[in-house]
Image (cartoon, rainbow, N blue to C red):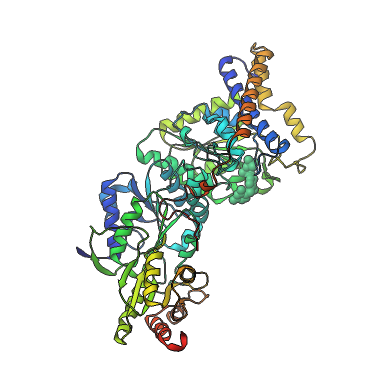
Amino acid sequence: MAVMTYADAAKLAIAEAMRADSRVWCVGEDLGRGGVFKQYTGLVEEFGPQRISDAPISEAAIMGAAFGAAMVGTRPIVEMRFADFALCATDELVNQIAKARFMFGGQSRAPMVIRKPVGMWRSSAAQHSQSLESWYVHTPGLVVICPGTPQDNYSMMKAAIACDDPVVYLEHKNIWALEGEVDTAAPAEIGKARVRCAGDDITIVSWSDAANVAEAAAGMLADKGISAEVIDLVSLWPWDKRAVLDSVAKTRRLIVAHEAVQVAGFGAEVVATVAEHGAPLKARAKRLGAPRSLVAYAPNLEDQLRVTADMIVDAALSSMEPENV
Amino acid sequence: MSTGNFDTETGLARLTMMERIRAFEEHARIAAVDEGLVLGAIHLCIGQEAVATAVIESLRRDDYITSTHRGHGHTLAKGADPVAMMQELLGRAGGCCGGKGGSMHIADFGVGMLGANGVVSANITIAAGAAHGVKLLGGDQICVCFFGDGAANRGPFLEGINWAGVFDLPILFVCEDNQYSASTLTSDMTSGDVGGRARALGLHTVEADGNDVTALAATARELVGRVRETGTPAFLHAKTYRLDGHTYFDPATYRPEGEADAVAATRDPIMKLRDALAQAGVAAGEMDVLRDKARAEMTAALDAARDAEWPADGSVFDNVQDVGSPVREAF
Ligand SMILES: Cc1ncc(C[n+]2csc(CCOP(=O)(O)OP(=O)(O)O)c2C)c(N)n1
Ligand SMILES: [Mg+2]
C-alpha cells in the first residue's frame, strides 16, 4: 500500500502495463511534456516518444488512427485532453470504434482506453466542464468507467488496458491531486461497485467525484443519526445492478447523485431499474443532478449547478420523513 | 496505344480480375434489382474496376487496405471469397461479417481488408492508424486507403493525411475520382484540386488515368514500392468514372444525357484492356472465355448465397463487447 494522487495512480497503472506489454502505447496532444494535467509526466523518459506519442491537434485523427492501430494489433491509450474535445471525434468513437467488432462479424477488436477528463474544474465554463457519461452508456459496444478515488483510478486503468473492448475512461479533473491509499494487488473487476460506506437507512448511488461528495454527505447524516449506504458504481457500463438492488432491498430508500445534467442522466437508469426490479421503496426515489443549464464561468454561477453534500443531506432527510412514504 | 513491352500474361491476369469484379457487381445488381434479395443500399463500382485491380496487384496478402461504401471491387481484388461476400450482401450467416455488416461494412481481415465504411472519409484516419500500428509493431506491411473524390471535402482527409506525413507512415492514399459525390458533381463543391491538397500536405502525389489499367498498374507499382522502401506516404489521384448510378436504385438523371454512354463507348477500362490485348495478338475468344468464367464464378456465388441460411436470431447479441455484453432482460 502506498499513498498517491488520483493522477499518479492511473499513471502507475499505465507504466506497469507498458512495461509488461510492448503493444501498449499512449497518444495525444502534448504528452511528451507530461500532458495538459501532468498525468503523463515522466513516461516519455521511460518509454520514448514512439510509445508516448505527441499528436497534432486532430482529435478525429487521434481517435481514428489509434483505432486503425488497434485493429492491426496494438493497444492504444488515447488522450482526449478534455472530454469536451472528444466530441470532435464522435464519429470515430461512436460509428467506428464501438461498432467495428460487431459490424465486421467479430473479425476485429478495438482494445483501446479512451481517456476523457470530465467535470467542473476551476471556472472552465461551458466547453471544458461537461460530464457526458450517459451518452457513452447509451452506445452499445463501449465500456464506460468513472473512477472517483486513487485506488479505483489505479485498478480500473489496469483493468481497462487489459480489456479487449473499447473503454471510455472518464477521469474527473477536480480530483487529480486527491490522495489516497492504493493497493496495487487489489482485485480490479469492471462492473463491480464499491461500497464507500455501509448503512441501513438510505442508499445513495453515485460515481466519479460526486461519490466523494456523497461520502461526505453520509458523514453529515451519521451526525444526525441516519445511516446512509454510499454505493460508488465506478463503472456505468457494465454497472453493478446487484449491489444497488441489494442495498435498496435493505434500506428501501434511494437517492442517486451525479454531476451530469439530471435530465436523461444515468441516474434515470438507476431509478428506473430499481422501479422495475427492486424492492418497494418507503420514500420516493430522488435524483440529484445538474439543472438542464450550461456550466458558467463565474464561480457563483458554476455553483448553481453543483450537487453539494448539503443537498444530498436535505434529500436524505426528506426521504426519512413519514409523509414521504 | 503503346504496346511496346506489353506483357499479355499480366494483361490477361488483370482482365481476369476486372471481369471478376464486374461480374460480381452485375450479379449483386441482379440480386438487388431483379430478385429483391439485397435489401440495403449497395454501391457498385462498374466502370472503376481498373483502380482496385491496378493498385492491389502490387500488394502482398498481408498488406492492409481500407475502403468505402463502394468497396466490393477492392475486397475482391485483395483476395476475399466472392461466396462469402455475396452471402454478406444477402445478409446470410456465411457472409464474411456473419450477415451483420452488409455491403457497406464488407471486410475480410484474413486478407488484410480492414473494412468498407458507411461514413464517407472516415476510413482515411483509420488507414493512417493501421500504417501507424505497423510501424509501432516493426512490421514491413503497407496500407492502401481507397476513398472517393467526395471524401476529400471532409475533415478526416486533412487530419489523416497530415497524420501520415507527420509520423512518416507507410501508406498510399488512393483517391478514386469518379467525378460524382452521390448526385453532385464533385468539382462544383471542391475548391482547388485534390492532388494540390495532398502536395500541400507534403505528400509525393501522382495524377493518373484510372481507366487505363496498364499504365495505372505501372504507376501504382512505383508508388507502392516507394512507400514500402521509404516508409513514407504517397498519394495517387486516379481519374475514373462510375458507369452506374450512385446506388443500384439511382437512375443518375443528374448527369448530362449521353455522358455515361460516351464513357462506356470510349473509356470503359475493360474494353480498353481488351483492345490492347487484341493489338498484342490475343484472340477475342480467349478473352471471352475469361469473361464467361468470371460470370460463371459469380453465378455460382449468388446461387450459394440464395441457398444460405439466415444468421441465428441470437447472434445479434454476439460480438458487441466482452464486458457488459447485451442481454434482453426479463421482468
Ligand atoms: C459523412 C457522410 N456524409 C454523407 C454520406 C452519404 N453519402 C454516401 S456516399 C456519398 C457520396 C460520396 O462520394 P465519393 O466520396 O466521391 O464516393 P463515390 O460514391 O463517388 O464512390 C454520400 C454523400 C455518408 N455516407 N457519410
Ligand atoms: Mg465520387
Q: In this view, does B37 lie to the left or right of A215?
A: right
The quarter of the image holding the N terminus of chain A is: bottom left
A62 or B107: nearer the viewer: B107
Q: In this view, does A172 lie above or below A23?
A: below
Residue B101 appears at what percent x and percent y?
56, 43
Q: How many labels does the image show?
A: 0
Residue B9 appears at what percent x and percent y?
56, 15
Residue A283 appears at what percent x and percent y?
45, 81
Can residue B212 be seen here? The reply is no
A167 or A269: nearer the viewer: A269
Q: Is residue B320 above or below residue A241?
A: above
Residue B112 appears at what percent x and percent y?
47, 34
Q: Which residue lies furthest to the left in this view?
A: A1
B230 or A46: nearer the viewer: A46
A114 or B275: nearer the viewer: A114
Can residue A308 be seen here? The reply is yes
Q: In this view, does A136 lie above or below B150?
A: below
Q: Residue A314 sits in which quadrant?
A: bottom left
Q: In this view, does B110 lie above or below B197?
A: above
Q: In this view, does B171 lie to the left or right of B183?
A: left
Q: Residue B102 sits in which quadrant?
A: top right
Residue sitting at x 51%, y 74%: A294
Residue sitting at x 57%, y 48%: B119
Q: Residue furthest right?
A: B257
Q: In this view, does A208 lie to the left or right of B176?
A: left
Q: Residue B179 sits in which quadrant?
A: top right
